[in-house]
Amino acid sequence: MKKIIYLAIFSFSFLIFGATPTYAVEEPYFDSNFNQNNGAFYANGTPITIEADNGQTIIKWDNKEEKVPNTVMVFGGGPQGTHFENSNITMNAGTVAYIAGGGISKDENHIANVKNANITINGGTISSGIVGGGILNAHVNNATITINGGNTESVIAGGLATVLLDSQLCHVGSATQPQNSPNRVNTTSVTINNITMPLPHHSGGSIYGGAFGYAFVGNSELTINDGEMSKTSITAGGADDYVEKSDVTITGGTIKLYQSVNRGTVKDLTTIVTGGSIEEFSVGTHSSGVATGKLNKCDTYLLYGTINNLEAGKIDSTPLIIDKENYKVIQTYDVTINSSSIPEDQRITVDYNISLYPSSLILNKGFNQHLDLTVYTNPEEYENIFSKIVKWESDNADIASVSKNGVVTGINTGNADITAKCLQKSQTSHITVEEKKAPTILLIIFFPLLLLVIILIFIIIFLPVNSI
């Protein structure tokens, strides 16, 4: 009887735990034999930090460390068949060849999986590139790259489906159906606050909002705030890949070339330029070289900054036609375009303005209130885009702070000016923060009650019992 009970318990446990995907729990380790002894470091989902000491690159985690060569490939995930919930790589110094948020697998039947991959670069050198997803047969659900410094040869928001390993070119996926590739990233977000590209003595660098090789990317967000990229080409999509939706925002930096696609496909693209200096800007694929990229729909907003040369470019080897429907180019009077092959009558020029209410506000300490901002555009229908780029600031955040959505909070008593700025237009609201006062309505209610209580006490104390 006991054997039957034990067997039942074992079978039940197998059904529960065997039917549930398990995530590998392994220590990070260094494989010195990988890629002809260039080496690979697998973080296996453990947060790691890359540092340097006396010219030696060191990877640290959980009070442990590993010295690695400058040729190493660093993976936030692991090798084939591994599954990890999260990966987190922070690089402050040192030199590595690659950093990939996901894992790597040559076996299509044993995918390397990471659900959420995070990479932060504060310094150091990545000689080959930063990859948000994984390499070859690898899946990443959400990839996030934040670059605050350092230098590299390339940044790839998605995955790497083509790579040179052991002197052989390895690739996965299909040229005809990259959307079905085993190299996949569902959503990816890249924010470049500062970067130097390419590496010294190199001819050029590359930034891809998509992937490299026959890979799939669902939604891609690429934001460039600053950096030295005067020899770097930026592509909203990728190379040979498929991107479902791409959103690119450029607020600063010096850039050689921006183009929508290269050799891949982008189904839907929105590009917003609100600053920086771009030497060559192509709505499609840049006209130089062989242009085979495909772009189904594209809205280009040139709102501020400097563009030396603007062109329509190509789509699938043929000239792209700016049609104000599927391929729009919207600009303001604030952007500087030195030369353009796109006639002005094919571009939509938008004027804009903003208003802020109230212009002054008395706010109790510790309380908050939303300021109402209205955006006007001529022609209409572009208000939403301008609303997205509004920036809020307080001239005295110790008195009153403001959120990115215009919610003002009283911090200390005093005065502060809250300014909403949209490109070259701004509006200000004067804020006075006071100590919290009892509302007048409460005083009106409380005073009669207090008076009644006093009268009752007087009656009880001073009037004889018989007279009550």
Image (tube, rainbow, N blue to C red):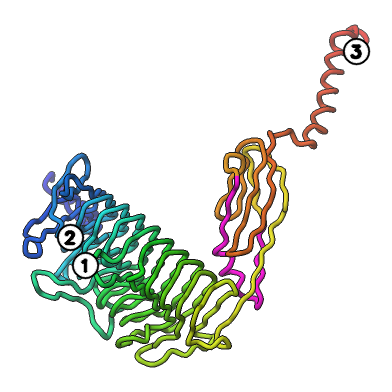
Q: Where is residue 73 in the image (x, y as percent from the top left)?
A: 17, 60
Mark 3 element type: loop
User: In the rendered image of this protein, does residue 56 appear above or below residue 259?
Assistant: above
Q: Do the residues labelled 1 and 3 touch (CB within 8 Å)?
A: no
| Residue at 61% across, 40% down | 399
Residue type at the position of mark 2:
Met
Q: Marks 1/2: CA distance?
A: 11 Å
| Residue at 41% across, 78% down | 280
- Determine the residue located farthest toward the right in the rendered image: 467
Mark 1 element type: strand
Task: Report which residue position mark 2 lands on.
Answer: 73
Task: Report which residue position mark 3 lands on.
Answer: 468
Q: Nearer the viewer, mark 1 or mark 2?
A: 2
Crowd tier of the residue under label 1, counting other residues whose Cα lies within 10 Å: few below 14, some 14–19, many 20 or above: many
Q: Marks 1/3: CA distance?
A: 93 Å
Earlier sequence position, callout 3 versus callout 2: 2
Q: Which of 315 and 289 is in front in this view?
A: 289
Earlier sequence position, callout 1 versus callout 3: 1
Residue type at the position of mark 3:
Ile
Q: Which of 380 and 275 is in front in this view?
A: 275
**How many marks on residues?**
3
Mark 2 element type: strand
Q: Which of 339 and 451 is in front in this view?
A: 339
Residue type at the position of mark 1:
Ile
The answer to whether residue 333 is left or right of residue 240 is: right
Q: Position of residue 357 (x, y in %)?
A: 71, 56
Q: Marks 3/2: CA distance?
A: 95 Å
Q: Are marks 1 and 2 in contact (CB under 8 Å)?
A: yes
Q: Give the range drawn in magenta.
A: 372-395
